[in-house]
Amino acid sequence: MMRVLRRLLAVIGLLAYFLYDLVVSSVRVAWDVVTPRLMARPRLMEMPLDARTDAEILMTANLISLTPGTLSMDVSENRNTLLVHAMFAGQDADATRTALKTGMERRVLEALR
């Protein structure tokens, strides 16, 4: 029973985080589009994956792609790395990579494991 409750709370946490990230990212992308100064500094970056199963990798990649400003492009053949295009990664790809790992991927793993 506790396992079911823990998983339910993890799924609710994932949904809440995704909705929050969706709103914040949408506003950031919209603001960049309507203002004259371009803030976007796009970058391709590799994100090491802790996700191992098909479901974990698929959910992580899809939720990243559904968030405005980011796009999952490819998974390495050994399934250890996800190639991500980030619209605002700029000079600090490490911070963007860390935000994706500690945000989206961590919550996906908590919900599915």
Image: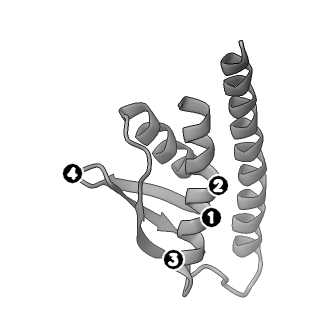
Q: Residue furthest top?
A: 1
Residue that mark 2 sits on: 103
Residue at the location (48% across, 57% down)? 71
| Amino acid marked by disc 4 | Glu
> Relative to 67, is 44 on the left or the right?
left
- Quadrant of the image occupied by residue 76: bottom left
View extreme (front): residue: 2
Q: Quadrant of residue 35?
A: bottom right
* Mark 4 lies on residue: 77
Dot 4: within a 10 Å radius of its alpha carbon, few (fewer than 14), some, or many (20 or more) residues?
few
Residue occupying image coordinates x 41% and y 72%:
44
- x and y, in percent, of residue 94 in the image: 53, 77
Cα–Cα span, label 4 and label 3: 24 Å
For marks 4 and 3, the one nearer the N-term is 3
Q: Residues within 10 Å of mark 3 (few under 14, many from 20)?
A: some
User: What residue type is disc 1 on?
Assistant: Ala
Residue marked by disc 1: 99
Residue 55: image location, x then y, percent? 43, 31
For label 3, the residue is 42
Residue type at the position of mark 3:
Pro
Q: In the image, residue 62 lies at what x, y percent?
A: 50, 43
Q: CA distance from mark 4 to mark 1?
A: 24 Å
